Amino acid sequence: MSSQEPVSRQWSPIEDLPEDWRETLVDKSVQAAMQAWIDRAEELRQSEAYKEFTERLHRRWSIETGIIEDAYTVSRSATETLIQHGLDAALISHEDVGNEEPIEVLRKIEDHQRAIQGLYSFASDQRPLGVSFIRELHQVLMAHQQTYLAVDQFGNRGPRQLKLGDWKTWPNHVDLPGGGRFEYCPPEQVASEMDQLVEWHRKHLETGVPPDIEAAWLHHRFTLIHPFEDGNGRVARTLATMVLLKGRWLPMVIDRKEKPQYIDAIRKADKGDLQPLVRLVNLNQIKEVRTAASLSIMISKGVTPINERIKSIANRLTELADSNAISHNEGIYRSSVLWTSANQVLKQTANDLNEALSEVDRNSIIKGRLRAEVAFSAYSDYQANLYTEQLMAAASTLGYSANWIAHHQWCALSLNLKNAFKLIFSFHAIGQAALGLFGCLPFVYKREGALDDRSELTTTWSGPFLLSESPFEFVDTEDVANIVLRFDPWLEARISEALAIWERDL
C-alpha cells in the first residue's frame, strides 16, 4: 500500500475496561438468565440430548468461524448436513465449497473443532491464560493453512508462508471501505501488548468481570493487537469462547448472516463503545440457552418402540407441567405483571383507534361495525389454551419450544376495518419448566375482508407473522422492576410495528 494513502486509525496501545463498566456494560437480565442456567441445568447437561446439542454446536462453531473471515466457502445446505451428520467430506460436493477440494476444507474445519474441544479441558483445569496458550491455539486452529495473502511495500498481493504460533514480523492493517486504513499493533510492540492483555485479563477475573463483558473485551483488544500474520479473527473468537466456557456459559457462534452486525459492533468498539459487542455476545448466549432449554423435543432420537414412546410422552408431560417449585410460581407472577401491562396498553390503543376512526364517514365501508377490541385470558382461565397452536408454530420458526403446558396466557388486539387483523402477545414458559425461563412472543394473523360474528369461526387466517426475531425473555429470579423497565419500550415498539403492517394492508 502506498505510504501516501490516508491512515484512518493510527495504532495506539490497548486500553483496559472503562472505569464505569459496571454501570454501562452489565445487563442484569442476561446475568440473571445465565445464572439460572448454571444453577438449574446440571441434570440437562448430563443427558444424551445435551451431548448431541453440544456436538452440533461445536460443528457449527467450527464451520462458521472460518466462513466469517473467508477462509473457505461452504454452502448453507452443506453446512446443515455437516452439523446434523458429522464432519465427513463424503457429505459435500465441489459445488458446496467453491474452488477448493472438499477434503481440504474439511481439514481446516476439523482444526477448528480440535481447538474448541481443547477449550473444555483448558477451562476445567482452571489453567490461567498465557501467551504460550494463545500461540498453541493459533497452531491448532491454522494447522492446515500453509499460506496467507499478503501485500508488500509496493502494493503487490501474493501468497506468503504462514508461520504457525509465531508473532508477526510484518506490519498488518485492513483497508477500509471508505478509503484509508486501520493500523494494528506494529511487530516490535506485539510481545509487550500481549503481556499487557494477559495481565489485564487476569485482573478482570480477580475483580469478577462477568463472562460476556470479558469475552467482548478480550476479543476486541486481541484484534487491535492482531499479533499473528493471519487467523487473528479465529483466535479472537476462540478466546471469547474460552472465557464463556470458564464461566460455564456456552460457545459464541457468529453465523455468516450475523457478519454485518458483528463487524459493526467491532468498529464501534474501535471507537470506544464496547456495548454493542457485549450485546452481541449476550444475544448469542440467550439464543443458545433457549435452544438448549427446548432439547427434549428439538432433537430427534430416532425410531422408538411404541410402549417406550408412551412412557416418554408421559414423562414429557410431567416435566412440562411441573410447576410445584416456588421459583416457577415466581416466574408466573412476573409473567402476570407483564400480561397486565400489555392488556392496559392494548386497551388504550383500541380506545384511541376507535376514537380516531369514529370520525370517518359512517356511510363508508365501516358501517358502524366494531373496529378495534381487546381480548385476553389469564393463565388460570379456561381460554388460556387458545392460540397455543399458533404459538408453537411461531416458536418453532425461531428454533425453540414454547412450553404452554407449564404456563400460558395471552392478550390480543383485533382490528376490523377493510380487512381483519389480530395482534397477539403470548406469554409462556420456555423449554423445561425447572429452568425458570419465560418469554413473550408477539405475532400477527390477518385475512382479506372484514369479519362479522358469523364468519369469525369459519374464516381462514394467514400467519403467524412474527414481529420479533426472538421472544422477550426473563427468568423467575430477575428483579420485577428491571423486567418492566425492559418490557415497556419493547411492547410499544411491537404494537407500533403491528399497526404499521395493518396500515399498509388497508
Image (cartoon, helix red, strand yellow):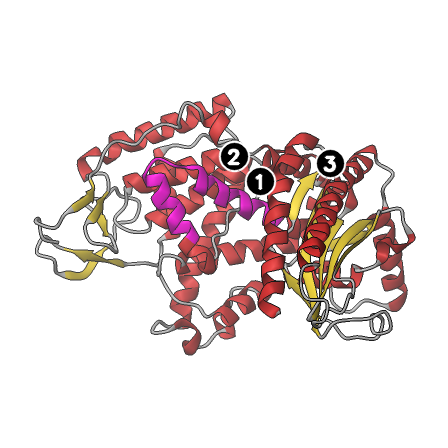
- Height in image: 462 above or below 298? below
Q: Secondary structure at mark 3?
A: loop
Nearest the camera: 111 or 324?
324
Magenta part mainly helix, strand or loop? helix
Q: Which residue is labeled 2 in the image?
A: 211
Label 3 to label 2, Cα distance in Å? 21 Å
**Splitting the image into 4 quarters, where does residue 459 fall?**
bottom right
Give x and y (percent) for residue 26. Answer: 52, 31
Q: Nearer the viewer, mark 3 or mark 2?
A: 3
**Splitting the image into 4 quarters, where does residue 221 fall?**
top left
Confirm whether the magenta stretch covers residue 1.
no
- Neighbour class for label 2 at 10 Å: few (<14), some, many (≥20)? many
Nearest the camera: 416 or 191?
416
Label 2 to label 1, Cα distance in Å? 8 Å
Nearest the camera: 336 or 52?
336
Q: Amino acid at mark 3?
A: Asp
Q: Secondary structure at mark 1?
A: loop
Quadrant containing the C terminus in the rendered view:
bottom right
Q: Are marks 2 and 1 in contact (CB under 8 Å)?
A: yes
Residue drawn 41% across the image and 60% down it:
67
Q: Which residue is labeled 3 in the image?
A: 476
Residue drawn 62% across the image and 52% down it:
494
Q: Amino acid at mark 1?
A: Trp
First of labels 2, 1 by sequence position: 2
Query: Which span is picked out in magenta?
Result: 261-288
Q: Is residue 479 visible?
A: no
